[in-house]
Image (tube, rainbow, N blue to C red):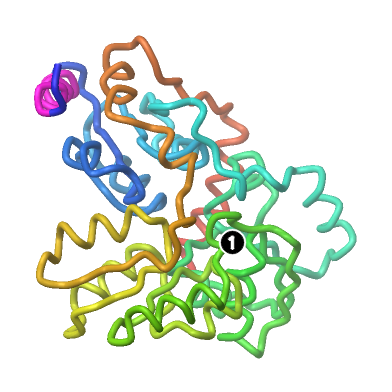
Amino acid sequence: MNIKEMQEEIIRLKKEKDVCILAHCYQSADIIEVADFTGDSYKLSVDASKVSNKNVLMCGVRFMAETAKILSPDKKVFLANPEAGCPMAEQMDVEMIQAVKDANPDYTVVAYINTTAALKTICDVCVTSASAVKIVNSIENDNILFIPDCNLGDYVAKQLPNKNLKLLQGGCPIHARVTAKDVQRAKKLHPNALVLVHPECTPDVVALADYVGSTTGIMKFAKESSNKEFIIGTEISITDHLGFECPNKLFYSLSKDLICSNMKATNLTDVYHALLGTAGEEIILDDDTITKAKACIDKMIELG
């Protein structure tokens, strides 16, 4: 079976089995082509909650599938590759954050969407990279415990000097590995290119960027800009996708090391076998976890 034949079979199977396929924008092009929805983790979960399909297949990482389950508790949600995790989401646990909360009782706990369902249960409000500044600014309390990404937290803190953000050492190891030297080198190679970076990058990298925003924000900016060249400071797949979508423009990855092995873990055959029922994993969350985790997502919607 070649790629086209497998894609055709996946499309047939998803209709036959009433499955909505979600693909995070870091997934490969062959998966995105068979997906019903593409985007960031929160958008995908909202999209899934609005369709009539009884089954949802997440092509992304575990916390994304958990978020989809939280917003669609009556649907069966599956993760295409059970090994696809997220180091950032998994680096802080309930016990650790509860201890920090106990030591700082006057702080509102803000959880980046890139956290486990379990951790969301003890947080006050959730944010995405696109909504973090707006939502933190909307919180009445000026004392904010922002978890887990200290780089995104630093970016938010710089935008909101009126707020007192407490940050812990955590974040995305992929975005954090990019350095200011990488930016300087890329700009020297491509002097006419604008630098677009994700706020999960370190503060010194963010300071050198022409645009800072979420993955979907980066893509929107590049598509709408009159500029013809761009250095992309997020997962390397976005450089590829933009190249396909805007063939009249040039896109360069900020670093060849911007590769997320967890996002790359899912391939087209995983999607195929998950639909056959010979691979993948159903995400099971108890009612209490769903209720408590959904509360901080509902608060995000209220404030956003």
Give the residue at x 51% y 73%: 182
* Disc 1 crowd, CA 10 A, few/some/many (<14, 14-19, 20+): few
Q: Is residue 248 above or below residue 169?
A: below
The residue furthest right is: 103
Tell which of 296 and 81 is nearer to you.
Answer: 81
Q: Is residue 194 above or below residue 23?
A: below
Q: Position of residue 156 (x, y in %)?
A: 58, 77
Does residue 7 belong to the magenta stretch? yes
Q: Position of residue 106 (x, y in %)?
A: 81, 70
Kind of residue sitting beneath label 1: Arg
Tell which of 59 and 20 is nearer to you.
Answer: 59
The part of the chain drawn in magenta is: 4-14
Q: Which residue is mark 1?
A: 177
Q: Position of residue 255 (x, y in %)?
A: 45, 63
The residue furthest bottom is: 162
Tell me if residue 90 can be seen. Answer: yes
Does residue 135 belong to the magenta stretch? no
Label 1 SS: loop
Q: Quadrant of the N terminus?
A: top left
Give the residue at x 61% y 35%: 289
Tell which of 66 and 71 is nearer to you.
Answer: 66
Tell me if residue 304 can be seen. Answer: no
Prevailing secondary structure class for the magenta stretch in the rendered image: helix
Residue 204, quarter of the rendered image: bottom right
Q: Position of residue 217 (x, y in %)?
A: 33, 70
